[in-house]
Image (cartoon, grey):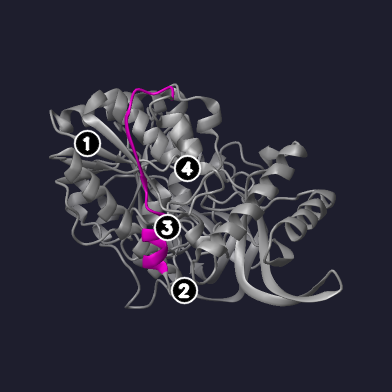
Amino acid sequence: MKKELVIVLDFGGQYNQLIARRVRECNVYCEVHPYTLGLDELKEMNPKGIIFTGGPNSAYSEDSPHYPKEIFELDIPILGICYGSQLMAHTLGGRVETAPVSEYGKTEVEIDRSSLLFHDVEEKTICWMSHTDYIAKAPDDFVVTATTPVCPVAAMENPDKKLYATQFHPEVMHTIEGTKMLYNFVYKVCGCQGDWQMSSFVEDTITSVREKVGNGKVLCALSGGVDSSVAAVLLSKAIGKQLTCVFVDHGLLRKNEGDEVENVFGPNGPYDLNFIRVNAQERFYNKLAGVTEPEEKRKIIGEEFIRVFEEEAKKIGTVDFLVQGTIYPDVIESGLGKSAVIKSHHNVGGLPDCVDFREIIEPLRLLFKDEVRRAGRELGIPEYLVSRQPFPGPGLGIRIIGEVTAEKVRIVQDADYIYREEIAKAGIEDLGQYFAALTNMRSVGVMGDGRTYDYAVALRAVNTTDFMTAECSEIPFEVLQKVMNRIINEVKGVNRVMYDLTSKPPGTIEFE
């Protein structure tokens, strides 16, 4: 599955997962590991290349993340990005200082096209800068291959030792030719052949799951979303009737969604699955009563999921494994090494300490969202399921700001249903991910010549491919107006509708 491997060493930057994503787009398998990964362990992994990420620290500070100098003597190609470039320069005898002028955002960079890294890149190209320190002097055996008016070392390299560095971020979409640069690194510098193919992933995963499970029984956490659906079908192909899928209706699903999931995966659906539906709405509402802190809500929902599964497992008999549709962004955002915990995903950071199964199987753990969709197509899952809108494990619990109640769930379900219906009528379903959320804000309004004091609904729509970055979608104003009118007129308890323009980062796609 992964004959070729590129390792991303994580020094705490915000774009680290994107680096792996972009390398995989080049059909080269890539994993993110913390910078604390030992040198011996790294050598055993036998990577074709290593990438140092960005990070918020200064390379010249004693308490900043560092890596043993010996890594540069392994004869393994290394690409340093932002902090990674400064760390390379500082470690190898260059000079890193606070920049007289910081650079943020899109910047025109002049590059040396004779560099392998910049093969077929324009002499002047737009790149994304984000730094307050800079490389004031490159190490003696390095040559400078890119500059800006205020950044004397925008890129440098020692081609004999296969060491390359860029002050800018080639992984973000704002660096116009960034993917080409990463392609040049993995193919022209690292010598990769590109053997990361989704068909191989599916075949190898089915084989490895079959070997791991043996004659054991498996319980699958099925939400009906893309991730858990692909995991369920993959496991079904691997072990057949040894798999039982448990669908927990926690009362935090979209309108009518519980019945829709049962229609697809239940006894009358197209898949030959052991399917159990558990209606646990009141149980979850009681657990969430009075809870307003987002992380606490996520952890409560995650633990209650596990407890329900344990109970169902006992009814079935001895169950050896639990399957979850965890994907790579879930893992990274829940905290990897020294990276920041952005939010605990209910099936990663939200897991309770004690789980009553021998082992948890996460067959999609190393895949990004669009890779999961590709895996689904390889498995023959219908397109309407594969391309379905993502829905978070904690459900509407994190699309309701503050305390979760049955009444608030009704409001956001109805508002979201109207929003989706009007998007479909307008024929713009391909605009990205979109949903309605309920803010915790109540404000004064006027309806029927009377005063109201009701909630505000926020509409969200974003364009994204990897779900690690996202930009606001441009919905025609007349569509937004129609959605607003319908929600206020048809959804009791709402007197105000807003449209969220925030990108990711600095926001997240979900509200909590």
Q: How many residues crowd around disc 3 within 10 Å: few (fewer than 14), some, or many (20 or more)?
A: many
* Side of 166 where 458 appears, left or right: right
Question: What is the three-letter code of the residue carrying label 3?
Answer: Thr
Q: Is residue 211 above or below residue 313?
A: above
Examine the rendering and report whether any part of residue 109 can be seen. no
Residue assigned mark 1? 218
Residue 157 in the image: x percent, y percent?
A: 46, 51
Residue 247: which quarter of the image? top left
Residue range highlighted in magenta: 269-288
Of 310 and 75, the residue lying toward us: 310
Q: Residue drawn 32% across and 77% down?
A: 63
Name the residue beneath numbered marker 2: 292
Of labels 4 and 3, the one closer to you: 4
Q: Left or right? Give the position of 432 relative to 91.
A: right
Tag 2 secondary structure: loop
Gap in angstroms between the C-alphas marked 2 and 3: 35 Å
Observer-nearest of 225 and 496: 496
In whole angstroms, how far apart are the C-alphas of marks 1 and 4? 22 Å
Q: Amino acid at mark 4?
A: Gly
Q: Which mark is residue 53?
A: 3
Nearer to us in this view, 102 or 141: 102
Q: Amino acid at mark 2?
A: Thr
- Quadrant position of residue 289: bottom left
* Amino acid of disc 1: Val
Res. 258 mark:
4
Labels 1 & 4 near each other (Cβ < 8 A): no
Q: Position of residue 82 (x, y in %)?
A: 49, 61
Give neighbour class at mark 2: few <14, some 14-19, many 20+ (Cα, 10 Å).
some
